[in-house]
Image (tube, helix red, strand yellow):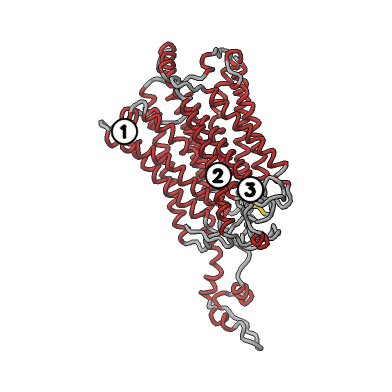
Amino acid sequence: MTEEPVRKDSEIGHPNSSMGCGHKDDKASLTSSQMAAFGYQPHQPPSTPASKEVWKKGGRMFSILLAVHLALLACTLVSSGAFEKIAVHDYDVFFLLTVMMLIVIIWIIFYLLSTSRCPAAIPCKDSHAGPIWLRGGLILFAIFSLVMDVFKIGYYSSFYSCLSAIKIIYPIVQAIFVAVQTYFLWISAKDCVHVHLNVTRCGLMLTLTTNLAVWMSAVTDESVHKAHSKLKKNMTDEIFRWLLKAGMRSSSAEECNCNSQVCQIFKNGYFWLYPFNIEYSLFASAMVYVMWKNVGRFIDHHSHHIHRLKFRLFRRTFFVGIVLGLIILVSGLGVLILYEVQVNSSTESSKKSQALTMYYIFNIVCLGLMSLVCIGGSVIYRFDKRDMDRHKNPTRTLDVALLMGAALGQYAISYYSIVAIVASTPRDAISALNLTYALLMIAQHTFQNIFIIEGLHRQPPKEEHKHSSHQKDLYGLTFVNISTVSLRVPDNGSALAPAAEAARPSELVRSLAAPKKMNWRRKFLREISMFLLLSNIILWIMPAFGARPQFDNDTELNFYGDSMWPAIVDICLPFGIFYRMHAVASLLEVYIMS
């Protein structure tokens, strides 16, 4: 969808663009005539010359290249450290991540104490960036991440004598990093910085890359831990140790004895909290990216509409969406508990088949309802009279890109499953359920993306008590019985005559009923948004906390092999989990905008 900005965003050509506050311009080669054309008016966006725009793109490109090289380096170390035969250990990965986090902490302190305090450093703020529900979710995940770091410190401290010091230093630095970054994003997410442009761009890209590197490390550790748990359940300790020596990565903590009950609590606790840390890193990366896009951006508040919307959860609703969503949520929690008990704690194949059948039936019902609801919401949008919001909005652009990009992970898993089920023989009831589940997963992601994108591009509703002047005139002209409407026309003028002649009873009834029809549409949209929000929460909780039938269903494992299929799932499933959480945040915004 094409967006037409009312005023072109530009970097302000005042001297506050380099390391010193007001000593050097962002583009030193500008001539004096160009400087005069820019002037020293930070609150008025000047006309941007071609050279300025080129340097703006050049500054962005430099920071992007820095981020790409750091991301490739971190990805190489993390992937290499996943195998024992490669001479890269987990403490090498932790050392790199610790250094990156320390640099980011130093830059954030510099930004808060120096950059943000320069004169005219932040002449405007992006009202769409960092909404309160996104920052609230970030704080929630940050709290669980801090608890995870405490558990990790306690676990590694239980046998510090046989571990590298970096294993204990890393969670300490990560806890400081999470606290500092959360405070930074809470107070600065809306900033449009106009000083230290290149340093700010590079610092934000380094922050984004660090969050992605921490995310990759957490996903790898969680996948290796689950693989070890599967092996330990299915074989003896001697065979397990032999496989670790043969090629699978073993954490250096595996070689130490963790026999005490407190140590086991710490170990199981921080692995259960990994999903929250993973989501925190992705949420922070999204917010940092929006800040990076807003560096040097000027927002004209006369044309940039600021909608101050109030979150009213229990007003103007029939509670149908909330009640139905809560039923799905509670039912999903019950299915998750039974699945964990029957699959992960039992070796009987019959209980495993029952758990898989129960899991697939619940998800088929849930995904089917969500698909139908999304289709209904899209149909309602076809009759919505609200205008489309075509203003430039980096936050909305990122939301749409993340929804479309993260959905690719679940698309890939579903298509791999479809190919394996169709090509495999024989086919049983579980295979038929798995095929239906994969097809509905593709359909639900597609319809939900359409519904969310439609909602994000709609203008917020106007105040319902404000009616048009024509309707107000009609209200003043009606008498007791609407079937026998009498109209008073002034003797000295005919200002109301056309309206009076046209205001027949049937048209008057339609005019009075029009706002009520709009209310019904918006109420249905709010019910749909709340139902989808609660349903996406349970569909995030189930795979994030262990319900992963991709590893327990033998069809895909037998078709693709024990090495290819787990690798596909480990790569694609984190994107599918992130999609659910990002859909929750987007649906909350759609709910408020309806």
Q: Are marks 2 and 1 in contact (CB under 8 Å)?
A: no
As measured in the structure, the alpha-carbon distance from the residue carrying label 1 to the one carrying label 3 is: 60 Å
Name the residue carrying label 2: 62
242 vs 204, left or right, is left
Q: Earlier in the sequence, mark 3 or mark 2?
A: 2
Question: What element does badge 1 sit on?
Answer: helix
Q: Earlier in the sequence, mark 1 or mark 3?
A: 3
User: Relative to the observer, which residue lies in front, 363 or 478?
Assistant: 363
Type of amino acid at the residue the image marks with label 3: Leu
Q: Residue furthest bottom?
A: 492
Please indicate, yes or no, whether residue 370 appears anywhere in the rendered image. yes
Please tell me how crowded label 1 is: few (under 14), some (14-19), or many (20+) other residues with Cα within 10 Å.
Answer: few
User: Relative to the observer, which residue lies in front, 384 or 327?
Assistant: 384
As measured in the structure, the alpha-carbon distance from the residue carrying label 2 to the one carrying label 1 is: 55 Å
Name the residue carrying label 1: 429
Question: Quarter of the image holding residue 491?
Answer: bottom right
